[in-house]
Image (cartoon, helix red, strand yellow):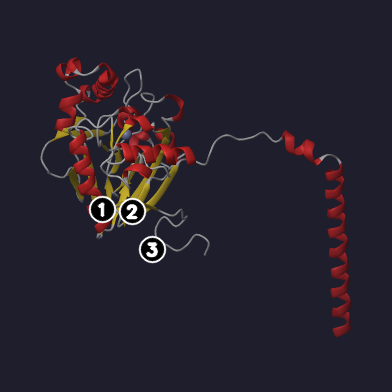
Amino acid sequence: MKNKLVVRGRNVLKRNALRFAAALLAALASFVGGPNAALAQAPQHHDQVPGFYRLKVGDLEVTALFDGFAVFDPHWLNGTKATMDGVVKELHEDPHMLEASVTGFLVNTGKQLILVDAGAGTWYGGGALGRLAGSLRSAGYTPEEVDIVLVTHLHSDHVGGLTTQDGRRVFPNADVYVAKAESDFWLSPEIAAKAPKDAQPFFQSAQAIAAPYIKAGKWHTFSGSEPIVDGMQLVPLPGHTPGHTGYQFTSKGQKILFCGDIVHAQRVQLQHPEVTAIFDIDQTAAAATRNQLLARLAREDVLIAAPHTSLFPALGRLRKDGSGYSWVPVVFTDRWDENAPSPQK
Ligand SMILES: [Zn+2]
């Protein structure tokens, strides 16, 4: 019996060895037939994986939605001569240091689907932006499902995705909320008429983007601190624009702040929070707001959703680092819910 098993075992081994040799010969035959020709026939693919990343904050599901990327021009920054000389020198060594993402964020509270900022759509910067609605679909949602859009400010890289060029609402069932100071400023024909020529496109786009929501009775403004949804706190962050507002959500003791344009050039302004951008309407207020907020965020354990960080998904935390701060990005994981079992197990 024992010997029979040994013989059978040997036969199996022999059979497997023969099969392996045959497979090897077949592979060699195709290799001799021209491996390079076969490789060259495979087309190159230019798309990345779908642009979303989700994680849990308490009971909230937060999904970062990639809208595209942009490159910040060093001439758009205002700092001391010494700081700006340093930026130019660093840029020479690392030409990619001012590359930035444009990102919107979706919060599923379990009761409502809330979008915070909507990306650029077709209103800003051409072909590299405007992918947010596609990213939202890739993440398993449809624009029709969005109940609420919270807008940090009315620059077109944050609200362009709300409306098509022919005036159609991309989120037909959503109520849009924006600070009254913000809405009053950008939608005022009087202020627009007095604005410098360079700023005119910002007024025109804000008015065109808001128009169909106003017409449908879905454009809402707020001026107090009354939360719009449960578990959310308004965080006024004036300076970049008159009604620039952050939205902080808390669930089960965990916090996330959607901070809008508190930082444009991450690699410069975290080390030098006093450096402003030419798009900051009140430069002094913008620098003061950033100084205060960054100090608080480094002290508290708050997850930060910052639309223009250089690394998608634009989610991370701050740590004090010398006289400035460093960015600690979230680490990619397929475990979107830390309490759920790993998909591998
Ligand atoms: Zn922006």
Label 3 is placed on what type of residue?
Asn
Q: Residue at x 89, y 77 (%)?
A: 7
> Dot 1 lies on which element?
helix
Vertical order, 127 against 286 (above or below): above
* Residue that mark 2 sits on: 317
The residue that mark 1 highlights is: 297
| Whole-percent x, y for residue 301 in the image | 28, 58
Q: Nearer the viewer, mark 1 or mark 3?
A: 1
Residue density around tag 3, few if under 14, some if 14–19, many if 20 or more, within 10 Å: few
Looking at the rendered structure, which numbered label has been put on residue 160?
none
- The answer to whether the residue labelled 2 contacts the one labelled 1, judged by CB atoms less than 8 Å apart, is yes
Residue 110: x and y in percent read 30, 50
Q: Identify the secondary structure beneath mark 2.
A: strand
- Labels 2 and 1: the sequence-earlier one: 1
Mark toward the start of the polypeptide (2 vs 3): 2
Q: Which residue lies most toward the front here?
A: 82
Q: How many numbered marks are there?
A: 3
Q: CA distance from mark 2 to mark 3?
A: 21 Å
Binning the other alpha carbons within 10 Å of mark 1 as few (below 14), some (14 to 19) or many (20 upward) gives some
Q: Are marks 1 and 3 in contact (CB under 8 Å)?
A: no
Disc 1 and disc 3: Cα gap in Å? 25 Å
Q: Which residue is mark 3?
A: 339
Measured from the top left, where is residue 107 in percent x and y? 31, 46
Q: Amino acid at mark 1?
A: Leu
Cα distance, mark 2 to mark 1?
Answer: 8 Å
